[in-house]
Image (tube, coloured by chain):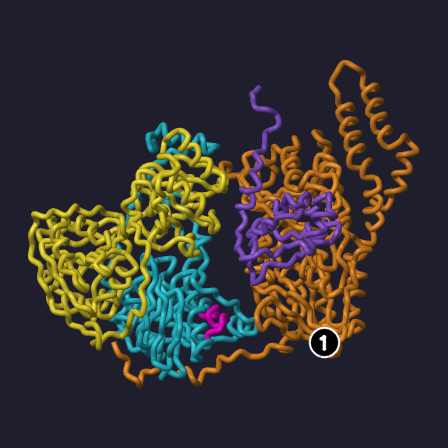
Amino acid sequence: MTADATDRISLADRDTATPDYDDAFDAVVVGAGLAGSTAALTMAKNGLDVLIVERGRFPGAKNVFGGVLYTPTLRELVDVESAPLERYIAERRFGMLTDDDETAVSLSPGEWHEPPHNDSYTVRRGAFDEWLADRAVDAGATLVCRTTVTDLLREGDRIVGVETDRPDGTVRAPYVVLAEGGNSLVSEGADLKDRERRENVAVGVKEVLEFPERDHAIEDRFRVSGDAGASYHYFGEGAVGDAFGGGFVYTNEDTVSVGLAYRLSDAATSQPDPEGTLDAFKSHPAVAPLLRGARTVEYTAKTIPEGGAEAIPQLVHDGAVLVGDTAGLVLNNGLHLEGTNMAVESGFHAGKAVADAADRGRTDADALAGYREALESSFVVRNLDRYEWLIERVQEDRQLLFEELPRAVADAGSEYFRMDRAPKDDHAETAKRELLQAVGGYTGAAKLAVRYRNLL
Amino acid sequence: MTDDPTIVVGVKQVPDDDEVRIDPDTGHLDRASAPAVLNPPDRDALEAALGLRDAAGGTVVAVTMGPPTATDVLEEAVAMGCDDAALITDRAFAGSDTWPTSLTLAAAAESLGADVFVCGEETTDSSTGQVPPGIAAHLGWAQLTYVEGLEPEFDDDRLVARRDVEGGYEIVAADLPVVVAVAYGEFEPRPAGLHRKLYAETEFEPLELSADEIGLDDEEVGIDASPTEVGGMETVEPVERERETVDTAEELADALADAGVVG
Amino acid sequence: MSVQPGIPDVDNESLEDRLYTVKYEDPGDSHLDVTIPGICAEKCHTDDCVSVCPAGVWRVGEDGVPEIAYENCLECGSCRWACPHGNVEWTYPDTGAGVTYKHG
Amino acid sequence: MSRAEKAGAVDTDAYSDVWVFVEVHDGDVMTVSWELLGEARGLAEDLGEDLVALVIGEDVDDVGREAVERGADRALVADDPVFEPYRADPYGEQFRALVEDRHPAIVLIGGTHTGRDFAGRVAVPAHAGLTADCTELGVDDDGLLEARRPAFGGNVLATIVCEDHRPQMATIRPGVFSAADPDPDRDGQIERVDPVVDERDTVSEVRERVVGDTADITEADRIVAVGAGCDGDLGPARELADALDAELAASRKAVDEGWVDGSRQVGQTGKTVRPELYVAVGISGAVQHVEGMNDSDAVVAVNDDPNAPIFEHADYGVVGDLFEVCPALVERLREDGLVDAADAEPEVKP
């Protein structure tokens, strides 16, 4: 078998040398999560050359969240309906748990069954984040995976690029968007923010469960059909013991996400370990019936920045901005557990601000200040400010709010509906006394009402 | 004297082992579901080839036989450091068994002017290990299989290898040109450089070569040049096992004694 | 009336089974470490790293210095914040190694 | 070498006889060659053709004789210094010349490293059909070789046939078949064939060959196999093997890590074993491993991961740390007198 010399294929005229990508990109985005991909998409749409550096094998590979994606901003940037979604939220239910009782409130507004379904969907991050990153690539961004940013490049205090864990691993760019999530090693390593106190960080643990022997288990147990789904939130002693936090159960297409999150300071001191707390929560009389016969598909864990408004770091630096969880943009006040909408909104504003600064050829913090201003006037910072006082107060009253009140409400409830041969006046009287005792009589109740007046 | 050797590396796209699920009703491996990745033993081959270039200079070119989607493995090879890469693609290759496959890779090596052809000892999806010796036979070259280490002596047109053999090893010096099949797990594959990975994944275009361009007629390749065919498949009932779990070593000893297996 | 208890029991899987559900690529060596073992041995009596970890990565050795089963790590970072002495060296497993979540 | 004819098809009637390649290094014959002669004896009888042993090496006349005693009707012996130690190109040329001259219908080769290196090389010039790693052989009604091999993974056996190319070649995993005992009364023709190559034509040179432990785990009645779980420390497995008077074997991972020699590897790319007792220590039980030990009578598995697939293929499973379970097992076996006393001379020296 001899190909004579004339057939010899010459590669000499092919130029395959490695180009130098320093300053070939206008911006480098650290992390292909919701904030990172949104920032990249926004900048790309404004004509910037953007490089997204993702440490996972694919966008979403390293990302974990409770389970519900809020898409009001995303809807204006991409066609949300063509995204890989699991179910829209048709019912929100809040359960207050003592060790063995539940008192719950449920909302199922009819309008949530119509698009845009209150912009609330359950998703699988492994699928959704990859889809969102693809939108950014479609718009012209460049994505490189399996590459971890380990540090920032500086000239003076101006940030001029990133360093990665690969050989020949530095790349310069005028702007860097830090979207590395809550475990923000790069931002902290480059002194763009301090390490959070453990009181301001929650540890989250979660399982995705399937029901091998039962088809329609989700439709039957959560009373949903078609693409409708449910979002159950739980708090009180039965969910996370005496820690400050809460539990959740969300319905995906044919799996269920069940998990909880509570402060690291509690996990370190009083609480059994996260896995033990999850087991107890899943076995609670009000939760167990939803999960019987389930098998674990995936067990995950995550930390959530919950420092609120006062813990937001400096968002804008010379040549760099912080977005999403890296900027601590998560609202958790017990009723609202929102991080995804905040991440997308911050990515959007950051992207716009970088594009504007690039038009003016400036990289200094003042030129990027538009990002902070836009964020402060958006729902992101305003919601955090609104509930800033609540988080401190709930911390102070946690004994009352998480143990005594749920117990009192449960006892009052069972008292009010007790079936015996005593007259209803006695039942009503006892129920009222249970409640008043817990809140410290009428004066106590009045004080509480004033103390939490801004909650409604 | 070979001063600027051309080192061609054969790589292949295979289903990802960890993602291959057992199809519950047939008991077969459901390969279609698994994503396609670079054949893991090929990373050792790429490292061996790049190591040769580090030691003695030369050009390293990756080649793969497959459909256009196989370009991904060439990108990974270029990202790891290969100077260039070629996709050997032609409908005529469909249904090839190891005979025409080794012929095609031999033709590609010849057309690219290879002095050394390196590949993994086997692929995880067929694992016959026959293709490398087949390529050497088609070309009439020397062959070095189950190679754990390489030492170039290109000034004397020779390549020295340490081969793993039953019960020990051999040191074998082969004249160039030579086909090398590297043992799996014996090399430390290097991580791709950032700029090279960016170039490979966004700008690099592999050279596309058809059967004709590497000097082969359609009848020499594909199904009608393949001596073997699959006559049939039959499921073999798994061996029945007690599957008895015991808690302690003592209980195990007793169980074995009762079963008359020991004592 | 069925004999079934009103509250079904949920058979929670062991930590080992749970960690088994997550795809993992071993980077070869640990991405976690303690900065100064002496601090763990002499100064630390609360072992917070052990109590916060959702994956049983941290176990205190006899000499008071933690043993780190890094292959179990779910990369949440809890230990880094929980350690009252800031004595945890936390880096990401490199070039995409470590866990890969499908659901997340 | 001329371009192979178009499709390489041949007139199959011009090919007959079953050949077995007898692999010999420095006078030692690999047991797989005798196993193939044992099995091929039946094939030759089914076909009504001769069973021929092909012996290539140096000073190998007595190997030819033993091949006849072990079932061959004839032995073809190519005896020359150029053939020792083994190299692919001289062996390949010699085989090509013999095939062109003698037209064998079937050629069976042991699936050792040398066997695979040789089979892949020689199948090409003859445009032969070659099937690798077979575990079953048969002949169909029109005399075609049915070479059966496990389709990768799962429990499926694929039957490979080679209709109009010759010879029909197959490599067979060591340990699958059993060798016939030599019968001194058998006689058959030992034919010396002239070598067609000499040292000047060769393109490679073996500068050094270091071969130590050539234990044959395929013959062992008891085996203790060690895997990744031992993390490099073979102590517990060796002690257990000594106590049970068993051969030490290994999974591919343990061989790849360099802790145990390749000749002791059980599984798809190693050997098939059929002991009375197989103890898997720290072995996860990948499909490719189970393929090589599934014919064992009793299987014991020791692993600290309750999820390890090996437990599904074991008669007795102990979920625990092998560094505790093995010593405890050895002690208990000795206490109950189920094995020789502790001072039995340990023969295991990998």
Task: Mark yes or no: residue A426 visible.
Answer: yes
Q: Colour of chain A?
A: orange
Vertical arrangement, residue B187 with respect to residue D246, above or below: below
Q: Which sits in the foreground, A217 or D311?
A: D311
The chain displayed cyan equals: B
Q: Is residue D281 left or right of residue A447?
A: left
Seen at 45% across and 82% down, the residue is: A14
Q: Which sits in the foreground, A128 or A298?
A: A298
Seen at 44% across and 40% down, the residue is: D302
Q: Main secondary structure of the magenta part?
A: helix
The quarter of the displayed image where residue A267 is located: top right
Q: Chain of mark 1?
A: A
Q: Position of residue D56 (x, y in %)?
A: 18, 63
Please state which amino acid type lies under the numbered disc 1.
Ala
Q: Report the magenta residues as a range.
A: B74-82
- Please identify the quadrant where the N terminus of chain A is shown: bottom left
The chain displayed purple equals: C
Q: Colour of chain D?
A: yellow
Badge 1 marks a residue whose secondary structure is helix
